[in-house]
Image (spheres, rainbow, N blue to C red):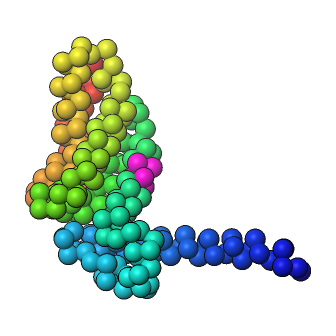
Amino acid sequence: MNIAETRPYRMSGRADSAAQTAERILDAAVQGFWDNPSAQVSLDDVATRAGVSVRTVIRRFGGREGLMTAAAAREQGRTLAERDAAPVGDLAAAVGVLVDHYERLGDGVLRLLAEEVRTPSLAPIAESGRELHREWCARVFAVALADLGRSEHQRRLAQFVAVCDVYTWKLLRRDSGLTRRQTELALVELLTPMTEAS
């Protein structure tokens, strides 16, 4: 095998290795955020978790803000893919997808929302999450929202957004101590009158 044949393989291997390193760094940043308030997530901690040097983190992401932005963008993409599994017109299945998401990330999302006030750089991330949630509700409940006048549509969508919000999950699941199954049933019961009203 000559040099020309081995070079693309080596370059591809380096690119794969760099991509895997970047993913490990992002995984470490996300885990660090869920474990600690955002202000306490340091580059040193992320580098240690990822098994790389701080210099590698900085070279790849340009510092803490760049790292947090990239981690948030990746997680939002994952959330979107996860939430998109919710079918339109099947309330129980849509609620199941929603609760799956909150069971996995709800406590972390609540931490992010609590940190938003103290850490201004988190505001765009939190706002982006709110918009994603609103768009999800608009898609999943499109049938119930169809043919409504503008003000009624706005009010009904706001109701769907509120009932499906992570704080509602917290009130049911954490504060009231409902089981996961009871939480799903409670959400279906809250949403049914709105989906049948149309």
Q: Is residue 68 above or below residue 187?
A: below
Q: Residue 167: x, y in percent?
A: 16, 51
Judge from the rendering whether residue 169 lies leftward or rightward of residue 142; answer left or right: left
Q: Is residue 135 magenta?
A: no
Instruction: Residue 54: tell me if it is visible.
Output: yes
Q: Is residue 79 magenta?
A: yes
Judge from the rendering whether residue 133 lies leftward or rightward of residue 120; answer left or right: right
- Quadrant of image for the C terminus: top left
Q: Say which residue appears at 44% left-offset and 84% top-offset.
A: 52
In which quadrant of the rendered view does residue 196 lie? top left
Q: Is residue 57 above or below residue 132?
A: below
Between 38 and 84, which is closer to the camera in this rendering? 38
Q: Say which residue appears at 24% left-offset and 63% top-offset.
A: 108
Q: Say which residue appears at 69% left-offset and 73% top-offset.
A: 11
Instruction: Residue 174: tell me if it is visible.
Output: no
Q: Say which residue appears at 18% left-offset and 33% top-offset.
A: 159
Q: Residue 29: x, y in percent?
A: 34, 72
Between 61 and 122, which is closer to the camera in this rendering? 61
Q: Is residue 91 above or below residue 167?
A: above
Magenta stretch prevailing secondary structure: helix
Between 97 and 151, which is closer to the camera in this rendering? 151
Magenta segment range?
A: 77-82
